[in-house]
Image (cartoon, rainbow, N blue to C red):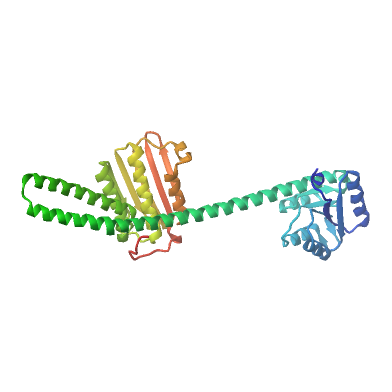
Amino acid sequence: MTQMASTRPIQLLHLEDSEVDHQLVRRALRRQGTEFEMVRVETLEEFQQQVHGRPFDLILADYHLPGFTAIDAWQALQREKCQPPFVLLSGAIGEAAAVDAIHLGFSDYLLKDDINRLAHVIDRAIEVHQIRLAKERADAELAASERRLAELAEHLQISIERERAAIAREIHDDIGGSLAAVNLDLAWLARRHKEDSTAAHIAAASEMLQHALGASQRIMMNLRPPILDQGLVAAVQWLAQSFQKRTGIATAFRTTQEKIDVSKEVRLVAYRTAQEALTNISKYAECSAVSIDLSDGEGVLTLEVTDNGRGLDRTALDKPKAFGLRGLAERAKTVEGWLDISSRGGVGTSIILSVPLQHDAIDSTSGTSP
């Protein structure tokens, strides 16, 4: 029983205008072995003072009282921070009224003629109340944990983008500058050394240098895509063209209009989603065709990347290290969006990003990427 699990007596508040009935309750609880301390009040004012001034484990209340009912007391209790379980104990309540009280939120009801069951009803009401409070605390802790996780994910994404931008600047300023200087030196050597053997080495070095320049440009584009400054449509279209050129997979890009104005945060999320989706396709899809659809109809920005490959095993999303697609879902949440993944074996996979534009601070200027 509940009172046996506690080191203190159960604290009861008894709303009852009859001293005789109050003493009957006391004797019934003692006979049933309940350790308790009980305060009796008769008026609504006394009831409000008691529930506001001290915590109770449970409230027992008659239904009909002089000038008010237990419903009035229950409504007054709702204004208090501490709301213990509320049990009706009455000899003059109909079944319909009892059912209405339960629907309102009363814990239970018991007829005075059945008072021998009172200890059991009290124990059950307190136990259910404690379980509900424990669940509410767990839900609140879970919600707080999810908020902290979302904040951490957003912070990490921002930090990653800043680091990418810093690395891209270093590649451009240091490596790019050095490669450009080497290119000038090779051109100078080529003009002054016409011997076949020397010219062949210079040509080979120039070819390798051009490869290095191209690689550095590609790395910079992946780290901080300046194409985003020209708008989301241009950026995703460039991604599609680059993917087709690099992989040889036929890639179709479709959009509802030539320009879609969204904030730089949404632009970056949509761009990274398309980029990660294409990266996964090149690694795993084994497909021959890809389509990318970008639209902003009905107040929602929608990006859909679809392939006709071997499909995605749903269990792959639950793997402990499936950070790519899971990261996209977390990234979408940072702009109040969501990610849907649809896949069937042998048919292909669709990755759909949706972002409600009514929550997006639209930036009609080109802006700058992080």
Number of labels in the image equals 0
Which corner quadrant of the image does residue 367 belong to? bottom left
Residue 332: x %, y % from top left: 44, 52
Pick the residue in front: 134 or 337. Answer: 134
Residue lying farthest to the right in this orientation = 20
Q: Residue at x 85, y 46 (%)?
A: 118
Q: Is residue 305 left or right of residue 12?
A: left
Q: Nearer the viewer, residue 78 or 332?
A: 332
Q: In the image, what residue occupies the spot 34% across and 39% down?
A: 283
In depth, the one of 55 and 152 nearer the eye is 152
Q: Is residue 307 visible?
A: no
Residue most toward the top?
346
Q: Locate the C terminus and report the quarter of the image it occupies.
A: bottom left
**Does residue 22 appear in the picture of this structure?**
yes
Q: Quadrant of the N terminus?
A: top right
Residue 130 on image: x %, y %: 73, 49
Q: Is residue 77 left or right of residue 331?
A: right
Left or right, 121 with reference to 156? right
